[in-house]
Amino acid sequence: MLKAQRPEAIGKATATIIGSCLQLDQPMKEKVSCRVLIGVGMLLLPVGWVLSQEAPYQLATPINELAECKQMILVVVPSWKSTSGNIRLLERSSDGKWTGIRPSFPCVVGKNGLGWGIGLHGTGVVGEPRKKEGDGRAPAGIFRLNSCMGIAPLKTALRFPYRQITATTEAVYDSKSRYYNRVVDRATVDRVDWARAEQMLRPDGLYRWVVVVEHNWNSYPGFGSCIFLHLWLGKGIPTIGCTAMSLEEVKFLVHWLDANKHPLLVQLPELVYLSLKQKWELP
């Protein structure tokens, strides 16, 4: 995980190494050593640039993850700029056949549509929208699901990890925090090091039921954070970057998910879905 050292720190440290080595009055032995350090530095420097400015575009096929997936949440919207679409919940039988376990239902996504996120699929395609922090887009791609959350204690056991939301549960958006892109309990952390976070126990009950999506799970600064599946404010009302649906559907979703079936979220514009359907062997 690359979060232990910030990209800007990598860049500055590398520049220091190179700068100190480019001195003309050093003994030969030190110059030889410095050539090695410069070589290492030049390898590290692009890493710092990449993570602090732009991650390279790459579209992969997560063969193993798709092969073991037996539950899929398939979200398809008409275009990159669309703010609403439809969700299908599917299960795969032992013979490999996908079956819808519920009629498709409407959802809303980000107020500015979709953009490629960072997930099992990689980072996306050159020339197509990319998810950034605060851009109002929901992430497109293939993502693992981390856990479910809710405001009430469970009356019946789920088949997926569950955390109860309390008055001190916060989603951290501050990219300078060690807890960036995580939902944490403010009362239990060693040190509150963030300036930007959202209280999960909202007066409007938007997070009555929540599924946490592993978008940008290595927490690269600036590429979007704290992405959920949750209750909508109303049909046709978009989110600031999550995917939302009716109370009936999100409650069903939380109780349907089964960790042993390795569920995945696949979220794409229609034309992209159709172009990748065969390659990714999507339902």
Image (tube, grey):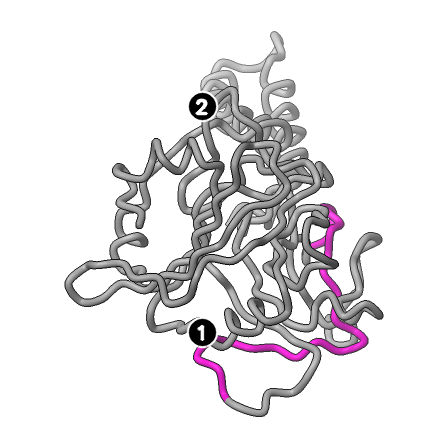
Which residue is found at the position 36% from the left and 61% from the top?
Answer: 90
Which of the two residues, 87 or 114, is positioned nearer the viewer here? 87
Q: Residue furthest top?
A: 24
Which residue position holds label 1? Answer: 256
Q: Is residue 264 above or below residue 111?
A: below
Query: Which residue lies under the disc numbered 2?
Result: 36
**Magenta highlight range:** 157-178
Three-letter code, disc 1:
Trp
How far across and how far down the image is residue 91, in percent?
A: 32, 64
Q: Which label number is shown at residue 276?
A: none
| Residue 69 falls inside the magenta stretch | no
Q: Amino acid at mark 2?
A: Val
Q: Nearer the viewer, residue 136 or 196?
A: 136
Whole-percent x, y for residue 209 in the image:
63, 71
Q: Are marks 1 and 2 in contact (CB under 8 Å)?
A: no
Q: Whole-percent x and y of residue 268?
A: 47, 40
